[in-house]
Image (spheres, rainbow, N blue to C red):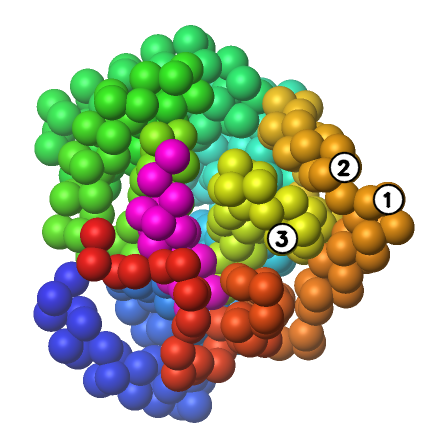
């Protein structure tokens, strides 16, 4: 990964040259090889753009190139999913599934079923998601089953089925520890931490997250780190440490903005709203919850009954403390503050971080000079 970081500019030049000289196979080979680098660093727009240009240049009959194409379709679909661009995601995954069956590649079939389950999970089609995960597990791919276990656990967690989720996370963690898969270990630790936190075991949650953070920083995994910061925000909030919770939130939000993680932004705004409720700042909470709801609606995502219940609880608290006309105004203002631009990453958000507007309209493709949070300090 360190070498890829150093060679990134050269790699970009090679990909651009290959596209200009009509060599899509070279781009797909490179893309397949550095997909994990793009994914961990949050370079989803860049990676997806390169791969889609190459995929559109034509088909092939070579078995070797078909294998490369199938994996490139998987990579493109995964980055589109992370950007919450569901139509593009489905197009790539379905094309990849057709190729996987054509190639009789069980690992690729299992992997694509798992990916389709992740898509359905984000779209709120939870029964279909669980069905896809079970189909992936049924293929009995030793290499892929762990991904299906953890993705199924993620879905059960969102549904509020904590015991079932914990069992699968623990199963996948043991497997990942056996094969020394650090990225997989980190994911399971995060899942187990959230289960512990949801069950009120804050100490275990924090211990798991500290272990997780060490691995994420070692791997330089930007997305995983941002989600860890968000969960540490929850732990600090539960303990009543508002300053630390705000600092963790600021870190998570800034990273998600940079990467264009739309789902993550909505989730972060929701958690920040819960923090604002705990601090008796119901006006800010109502705005943030409304912005998050608008964002989820824009990308076509649906929440589980359990997830919606936590939002409803916070909104009900706000209603008790805010005059009805002002509440309606705040909710409408939150809806207006979510803007979907015609760029490759649909993430522009106006965040109210204090009584004045200290956030700015930002976009994941635009470098922003500073990000202000009056309540946040980075010297944790």
Q: Which of 96 and 105 is in front in this view?
A: 96
Q: Do the residues labelled 2 and 1 touch (CB within 8 Å)?
A: yes
Q: Is the magenta stretch mostly helix, strand or loop?
A: helix
User: How far apart are the alpha carbons under marks 1 and 3?
Assistant: 15 Å
Q: In this view, does 38 lie to the left or right of 154?
A: left
Q: Is residue 31 left or right of residue 96?
A: left
Residue topped by disc 1: 324
Badge 3 density bin: few <14, some 14–19, many ≥20, Cα 10 Å? many
Image quarter hosting the N terminus: bottom left
Residue topped by disc 2: 319
Q: Do the residues labelled 1 and 3 touch (CB within 8 Å)?
A: no
Q: Is residue 125 left or right of residue 14?
A: right
| Element carrying mark 3 | helix
Look at the image and give the residue range highlighted in magenta: 240-259
Q: Which residue is drawn at 42% across and 9% down?
A: 163
Q: Residue at x 53, y 26 (%)?
A: 158
Q: Residue at x 16, y 43 (%)?
A: 215
In reply to whether residue 261 is colored magenta, the answer given is no
């Amino acid at each position: 990964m360190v070498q890829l970081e150093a060679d990134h500019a050269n790699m970009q030049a090679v990909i651009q040259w290959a596209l200009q000289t009509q060599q899509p196979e070279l781009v797909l080979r490179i893309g397949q090889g550095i997909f994990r680098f793009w994914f961990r660093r949050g370079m989803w727009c860049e990676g997806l753009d390169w791969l889609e240009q190459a995929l559109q240049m034509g088909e092939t009959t070579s078995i070797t190139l078909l294998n490369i194409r199938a994996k490139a379709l998987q990579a493109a679909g995964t980055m589109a999913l992370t950007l919450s661009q569901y139509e593009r995601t489905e197009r790539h995954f379905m094309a990849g599934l057709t190729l996987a069956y054509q190639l009789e590649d069980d690992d690729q079939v299992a992997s694509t079923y798992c990916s389709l389950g992740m898509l359905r999970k984000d779209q709120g089609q939870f029964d279909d998601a669980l069905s896809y995960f079970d189909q992936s597990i049924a293929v009995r791919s030793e290499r892929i089953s762990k991904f299906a276990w953890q993705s199924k656990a993620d879905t059960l967690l969102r549904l509020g089925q904590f015991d079932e989720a914990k069992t699968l996370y623990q199963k996948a963690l043991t497997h990942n520890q056996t094969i020394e898969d650090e990225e997989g270990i980190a994911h399971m630790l995060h899942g187990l931490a959230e289960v512990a936190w949801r069950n009120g075991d804050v100490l275990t949650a924090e211990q798991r997250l500290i272990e997780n953070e060490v691995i994420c920083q070692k791997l330089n995994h930007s997305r995983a780190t941002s989600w860890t910061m968000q969960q540490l925000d929850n732990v600090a909030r539960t303990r009543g440490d508002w300053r630390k919770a705000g600092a963790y939130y600021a870190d998570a939000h800034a990273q998600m903005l940079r990467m264009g993680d739309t789902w993550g932004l909505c989730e972060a705004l929701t958690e920040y709203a819960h923090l604002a409720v705990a601090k008796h700042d119901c006006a800010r909470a109502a705005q943030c919850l409304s912005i998050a709801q608008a964002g989820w609606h824009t990308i076509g995502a649906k929440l589980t009954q359990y997830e919606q219940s936590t939002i409803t609880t916070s909104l009900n608290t706000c209603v008790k403390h805010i005059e009805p006309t002002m509440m309606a105004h705040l909710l409408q203002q939150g809806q207006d503050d979510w803007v979907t631009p015609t760029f490759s990453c649909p993430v522009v958000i106006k965040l109210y971080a204090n009584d004045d507007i200290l956030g700015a309209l930002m976009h994941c493709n635009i470098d922003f000079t500073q990000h202000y949070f009056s309540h946040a300090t980075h010297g944790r």
